Image: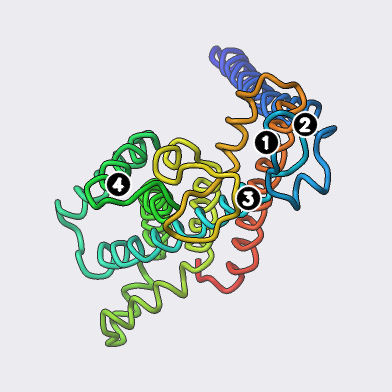
Amino acid sequence: MNHSPRRYLEEKFFKWVMRASLFVVVGTLGLIVVSVMWKGAGALNWAMLTQPPQGGYYLGKEGGILNAILGSLYLASGATALALAAGIPVVLYLNAYAGHSRLVSGVRLMFDVLWGVPSIVYGVFGFTLMLLVGLRASLLGGIIALALVELPILTRTMDEVIRMIPRDLIESTCALGTTRLELVGIILRQTLPGLFTAMLLAYGRGFGDAASVLFTAGYTDGMPRSLFRPVASLPLAIFFQLSSPFPEVQARAYASALVLMAMTMIISLLARLSLRLLGRHVVR
């Protein structure tokens, strides 16, 4: 009885701490959204979304950011496809073939460390590789650098999704005499919602990353036409427009940020929707 008032006060205190934390997080997000919309909504128009930059664009004249929108889509799509091609075999091997060993723990630790490496480091590493093979700043170079950024995110997320499969399901499947390859197919079907969500999350990270493509993809006012030519991206378009001394161009930077934020939000909503739709028939 002596401790009940103390426990009540502790519970009330920590409840207010959690509410305050929620208010700070939601309030910060709200301030970012309102600030970007306030400064950029007036500069956003149809021509900005459907035209590439024209002569004098960075001096406040006509044009848009269509080249940067398409460039970001190409970069993120190519990088996600490349990261999937490299990551899925690794994850399936770790969970279906390698078993429990120090090697598996070491590989997981390595991907955890790679997840925390700043994307600018991947950009510098990709740029160094490009110099060694004689590749200039291009769409291909940006895809490779972005794939390196996405790979640890994609791999560790998929790995955790697969490890959430009920152990009884795996054991009962093996008891029926299935081969390792058949087990891989069952794992893929069982974890499809989580794998698709992980892919969309990695895609969203690649879509909004700027540091890794700064040296590797370069920048151009032209439309993306080749894997071996420089390509624009939305994050760098925002950076270069904010660097302009002209208020009209700076307003376009906030409008570009609004477009980037909206597209990232769409990707996040698609991830949540896919998890709900594809997860209906998953055994839990």
| Residue at image point 74% right, 35% down | 255
Element class at badge 2: helix
Amino acid, disc 1: Ala
Residue 228 in the image, given as x and y percentages of width and height: 42, 57
Amino acid, disc 3: Asn
Closer to the eye: label 4 or 2: 2
| Residue at image point 38% right, 79% down | 185
Q: Which residue is mark 3?
A: 67
Q: Nearer the viewer, residue 257 or 141?
A: 141
Amino acid, disc 4: Phe
Give the quarter of the figure containing the N terminus.
top right
Mark 3 Cα shell of 10 Å, populated few (<14), some (14-19), many (≥20):
many
Q: Which residue is mark 1?
A: 257
Disc number for residue 111: 4
Element class at badge 3: helix
First of labels 4, 3 by sequence position: 3
